[in-house]
């Protein structure tokens, strides 16, 4: 009933328009119509440069509706969405269906971010009311992206790219989100590009440094190894956190030269330590899918003169999951050559106990989020106890991360975890200070 009503209504409205400008399901315009309208509006506005806004809307969780209730029900909802959007378009505005559950609109009289925000509130309300499917009704939220001409682009293609980016950002932030390209995204993109350029420069100039955080025996505080952590200070941008520049380097394809430079520096520093002190180094996700990784790592440590038995590589499960077969092959080759593998941030993300059996590992690092709660929170205590027991059964060593107090350290020892790192024992230090730390380490350094 709803389909018939909606389709009939819009087909009638479409009048004599050629069929290629019409979406057959909803009777709204299609992508060709959107292009036509935007191109015309751009031509008009280039003479009278008033802004206008284009928007994209995408239903959240629409696919499961199709799977659960069948395609006719999905089509019915799309027609209801079309009907609702058409009914609330302000004067002069046009709404079209692009494909699937994606709709686009042109708002010739929305000139700025405030206008786009207020109209998105209206659209959100209208689309969040229940959809009638005969015997049942469903509720759906929608994500929005907006782009304002001319700031987000002066031509159709550029505007569509901007509005796509805005919608993509909304989707990444969750459900029912609105993103306006013109101000926040453009600024963020500009800053990201500036950061990328500075990072490229710093990598070439070998300016990204490595600091070393002690990993200790919790029963006596004595260092047994160091985790290498990247540090970057840019003259203009100041200190940039690794949590920012490492993912950026991964995204922009410059993680490889960065990691190689860092490993070279870290291996050189480790040569000054006693031979029984290990170096733990973070591998990024890109390296776990690259078959050349094994060769590169071996060549760097061999030329530095570091025995593979002194190197541990920290990996995460998320990185493993990108291409599990490739990752397994790389890990196996590294381990065959004597390098150890630690599973970092265990207990977060998509941790699965099954994975502990699948990957050939040597160590598991319990994430700081459990450690920081261990002396206050029973569930964290139980989780740590379970991880320790599991690792014991699988013959894996356990390291606790982020230990900040003596109480946490004591509790961990009580729970059977005897190695760890954290500010309580030492913050990440430059190479010279790490060496000093080792020299000052007494047989029983701390009372914990
Ligand atoms: P991560 O590998 O889990 O490293 C531990 C982080 O916790 C480090 O942050 C460390 O400084 C911090 N930390 C250590 N102890 C404590 C503590 O007691 N309290 C608190 N609050 N924090 C503590 P950092 O250096 O900012 O690094 C953040 C993340 O960036 C790292 O997390 C790692 O994922 C990544 N990262 C850092 N250096 C490298 C690198 O050389 N290569 C790669 N691929 N990733 C790196
Ligand atoms: Ca780590
Ligand atoms: Ca970690």
Image (cartoon, rainbow, N blue to C red):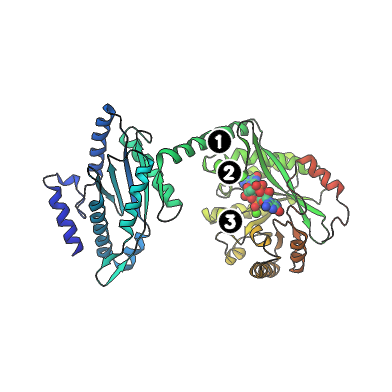
Picture layout, residue 411 above or below residue 148: below
Q: Which residue, given by chain and number where applicable, does mark 1 sit on?
A: 195
On screen, residue 169 versus residue 253, left or right, reads left
In the image, residue 108 lies at what x, y percent? Answer: 27, 39
- Mark 2–mark 1 Cα distance, whole angstroms, equals 10 Å
**Quadrant in which residue 236 is drawn:** top right
In the image, residue 161 lies at what x, y percent? Answer: 37, 40
- Mark 3–mark 1 Cα distance, whole angstroms, equals 33 Å
Q: Residue at x 40, y 38 (%)?
A: 182
Task: Tell me, yes or no, if residue 52 can be seen here.
Answer: yes
On screen, residue 113 versus residue 251, left or right, reads left
Q: Which residue, given by chain and number where applicable, does mark 3 sit on?
A: 328
Quarter of the C terminus within the rendering: bottom right
For marks 3 and 1 on the same chain, the one whose residue lies earlier in the sequence: 1
Q: Dot 3, crowdedness within 10 Å: few (<14), some or many (≥20)?
A: some
Q: Nearer the viewer, mark 2 or mark 3?
A: 2
Comparing 416 with 311, the one in front is 416
Label 2 close to label 1 by CB (< 8 Å): yes
For marks 2 and 1 on the same chain, the one whose residue lies earlier in the sequence: 1
In the image, residue 4 lies at what x, y percent? Answer: 16, 61
Picture layout, residue 71 above or below residue 31: below
Q: Dot 1, crowdedness within 10 Å: few (<14), some or many (≥20)?
A: some
Q: Which residue, given by chain and number where applicable, does mark 2 sit on?
A: 244
For marks 2 and 3 on the same chain, the one whose residue lies earlier in the sequence: 2
């Amino acid at each position: 009933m709803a389909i018939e009503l909606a389709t009939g209504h819009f087909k009638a409205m479409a009048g004599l328009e050629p069929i290629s400008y019409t979406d057959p399901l909803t009777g709204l315009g299609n992508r060709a119509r959107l292009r036509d309208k935007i191109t015309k509006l751009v031509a008009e506005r280039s003479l009278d440069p008033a802004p206008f806004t284009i928007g994209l809307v995408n239903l959240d969780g629409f696919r499961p509706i199709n799977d659960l209730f069948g395609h006719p029900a999905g089509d019915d909802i799309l027609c209801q969405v079309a009907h609702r959007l058409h009914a609330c378009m302000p004067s002069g505005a046009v709404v079209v269906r692009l494909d699937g559950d994606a709709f686009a609109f042109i708002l010739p009289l929305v000139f700025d971010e405030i206008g786009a925000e207020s109209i998105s509130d209206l659209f959100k309300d209208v689309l969040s009311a229940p959809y009638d499917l005969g015997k049942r009704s469903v509720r759906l939220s929608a994500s929005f992206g907006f782009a304002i001409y001319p700031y987000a682009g002066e031509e159709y293609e550029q505007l569509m790219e901007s509005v796509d980016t805005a919608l993509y950002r909304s989707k990444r932030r969750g459900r029912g989100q609105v993103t306006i390209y013109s101000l926040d995204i453009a600024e963020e993109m500009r800053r990201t590009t500036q950061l990328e350029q500075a990072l490229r420069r710093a990598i070439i100039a070998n300016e990204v440094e490595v600091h070393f955080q002690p990993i200790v025996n919790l029963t006596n505080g004595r260092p047994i190894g160091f985790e290498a952590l990247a540090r970057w200070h840019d003259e203009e941008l100041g200190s940039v956190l690794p949590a920012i520049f490492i993912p950026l380097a991964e995204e922009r394809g410059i993680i490889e030269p960065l990691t190689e430079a860092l490993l070279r520096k870290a291996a050189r520093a480790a040569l000054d330590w006693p031979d029984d002190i290990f170096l733990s180094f973070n591998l990024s996700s890109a390296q776990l899918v690259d078959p050349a990784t094994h060769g590169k790592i071996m060549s760097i440590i061999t030329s530095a003169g570091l025995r593979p038995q002194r190197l541990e590589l920290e990996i995460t499960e998320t990185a493993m999951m990108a291409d599990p077969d490739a990752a397994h092959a790389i890990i196996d080759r590294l381990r065959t050559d004597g390098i150890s593998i630690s599973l970092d941030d265990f207990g977060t993300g998509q941790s699965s106990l099954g994975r502990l059996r699948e990957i050939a590992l040597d160590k598991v690092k319990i994430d700081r989020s459990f450690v920081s709660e261990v002396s206050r929170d029973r569930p964290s205590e139980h989780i740590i106890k379970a991880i320790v027991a599991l690792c014991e059964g699988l013959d894996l060593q356990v390291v606790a991360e982020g230990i900040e107090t003596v109480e946490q350290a004591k509790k961990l020892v009580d729970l059977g975890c005897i190695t760890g790192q954290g500010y309580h024992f030492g913050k990440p230090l430059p190479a010279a200070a790490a060496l000093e730390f080792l020299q000052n380490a007494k047989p029983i350094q701390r009372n914990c």
